[in-house]
Image (tube, rainbow, N blue to C red):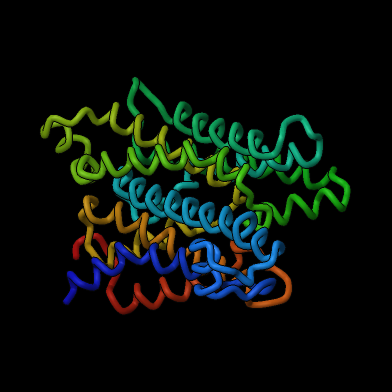
Amino acid sequence: MKKIFILSLYLLPIPVLLGSFFIGSAFHISLIDLWQYYSGSPSILSESAQIVLFDIRAPRIILVFLVGAVLSASGGAMQAVFRNPLVDPFILGLSSGAAFGAALSVSFHLLPLIPSAFIFGILAAGTSYFAAMQNKEVSTISLILAGVVVNGIFTALLTIIQFISDPFKLQSIIHWTMGNFHTASWEKVQVSLLPMVVGLCILLLYRWRLNVLALGDDEAKSSGVHVLRDKWILLLIISIACSAAVAVAGIIGFYGLIVPHIVRMIVGVDNRKLIPLCIALGGSFLVVIDDISRSLMSFELPIGIFTMIIGAPVFLFLMKKNHIGWNH
């Protein structure tokens, strides 16, 4: 029974992605309408409905799923690498760096928003890593502490930008930092698709090594794993993929922390199962949250608000019920 349940979770993206096409406050489109459109039969889809369906909803659904999958899988991988259940993809200051880059773009137009957020997100993560490096080795504690410091620096810089920005630009900056997909487009999908998909593929390839790295550096070395090289590759890929996600979606806080723990309660600590399910469940869960955020009211609330309102109580309930940990 449990195997059937887990298999259904792996297949969850199919109904969630298809169902999301028909959810929205602008046009109510049925599956029959879509079937008639694709089969060449006379369709009642108006030109406006086709634009909403294929140029607005389609890129948004794809983008939301990819962002959710990247944040979830990256969170699970980083928790294994650092052997710390409180780590998430933003621990290296990536989110604050990307937020500063976005604010810089909105206020001074030095670079387009997406490249600016991407560059400063990578810069923040790289700064944390190099600041923590000693004798060509990086300890987990040093890296987390460096990430906290870098996060504080870029948060302070972001505050300065907000303080000197005019009210209209300040509103845009604050709205971006809450996380949203209301400006999703095929252009954003094209810009972010390669780094996010490549990042997910590499995490899938490295999922068995994560089990070894989670044992600790000494045990991993004795197993023949090149610990420093693998950590370099994983952190670089995670930083690039998450920077791309943050650049197109803003900051979706705590999502990369909550989802891996929920998945871990279902399949345990084996990363060979955890990473694929993080991709499937993480992407699907964020699509469902986005469906709620864009259809619940006549106006759209930032998705970052919903991830905490919905995700946090679910996480606390599961934590209380299942005694969250690493040893079950």
* Picture layout, residue 215 above or below residue 177: above
Tell me the quadrant of the picture where the N terminus can be found.
Answer: bottom left
* Picture layout, residue 1 above or below residue 200: below
Q: Is residue 128 visible to us here?
A: yes
Left or right: 124 as drawn, with respect to 89? right
Q: Is residue 93 visible to us here?
A: no
Q: Give percent across and percent down for residue 48.
A: 71, 63
57 vs 269, nearest the viewer: 57
Q: Give percent across and percent down for residue 20.
A: 52, 68
Q: Give percent across and percent down for residue 70.
A: 44, 49
User: In this figure, what is the number of numbered marks?
Assistant: 0
Tell me the quadrant of the picture where the C terminus can be found.
Answer: bottom left
Looking at this rendering, what residue extends furthest in the front direction?
Answer: 41
The image quarter containing residue 106 is top right
Q: Give percent across and percent down for residue 6.
A: 24, 68
The image quarter containing residue 104 is top right
The image quarter containing residue 7 is bottom left
Q: Residue at x 59, y 73 (%)?
A: 29
82 vs 116, nearest the viewer: 116
38 vs 91, nearest the viewer: 38
Q: Residue at x 37, y 51 (%)?
A: 73
Q: Residue at x 46, y 66 (%)?
A: 18
* Picture layout, residue 167 above or below residue 224: below
Q: Residue at x 43, y 30 (%)?
A: 132
Looking at this rendering, what residue extends furthest in the top direction?
Answer: 135
Left or right: 13 as drawn, with respect to 95? left
* Picture layout, residue 228 above or below residue 69: above
